[in-house]
Image (cartoon, rainbow, N blue to C red):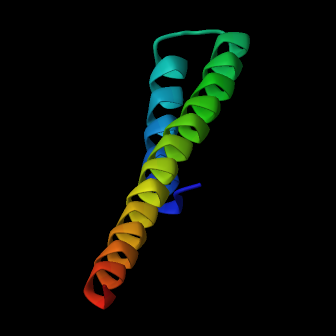
Amino acid sequence: MNKRLTIFLLPLIAIWMFFLAKIGMNGFTVFLGIVFSIIYVCIAAGIVDGVTKAKGEMYLANKYDEEKNKSN
């Protein structure tokens, strides 16, 4: 998982939970909000991490092709 994105999103979850508690949501609603927010962070970080890995693999594949073409 992308740690920078996770570190960025977790404080946003805390602010969101404070907002829900402030407007009078009951404890169960706040708990569900926490659970869904953590799931959201995991999914978002996984998507960003997958895109980053794909870009890295694409870069390495292009480098390999360039060196292969130079040798031919």
**Residue closest to the eye, 41 or 28:** 41
**Relative to 31, 60 lies left or right:** left
**Residue closest to the eye, 68 or 7:** 68
Q: Residue at x 41, y 68 (%)?
A: 61
**Relative to 3, 72 lies left or right:** left
Position of residue 69 relative to residue 29, above or below, is below
Residue 10 seen: no
The C terminus sits in image quarter: bottom left
Q: Position of residue 5 (x, y in %)?
A: 45, 53
Position of residue 65 relative to residue 36, above or below, is below
**Residue closest to the eye, 31 or 26:** 31
**Count of marks overlaid on the render:** 0
Q: In the rendered image, which quarter is residue 69 located in?
A: bottom left
Q: Position of residue 27 (x, y in %)?
A: 71, 16
Q: Position of residue 11 (x, y in %)?
A: 47, 46
Residue 9 seen: yes
Q: Residue at x 50, y 18 (%)?
A: 20
Q: Residue at x 45, y 55 (%)?
A: 54
The N terminus sits in image quarter: bottom right
Residue sitting at the far bottom: 71
Position of residue 33 relative to residue 52, above or below, is above
Q: Residue at x 70, y 21 (%)?
A: 31
Q: Position of residue 21 (x, y in %)?
A: 55, 20
Residue sitting at the far front: 72
Q: In the rendered image, which quarter is residue 30 located in?
A: top right
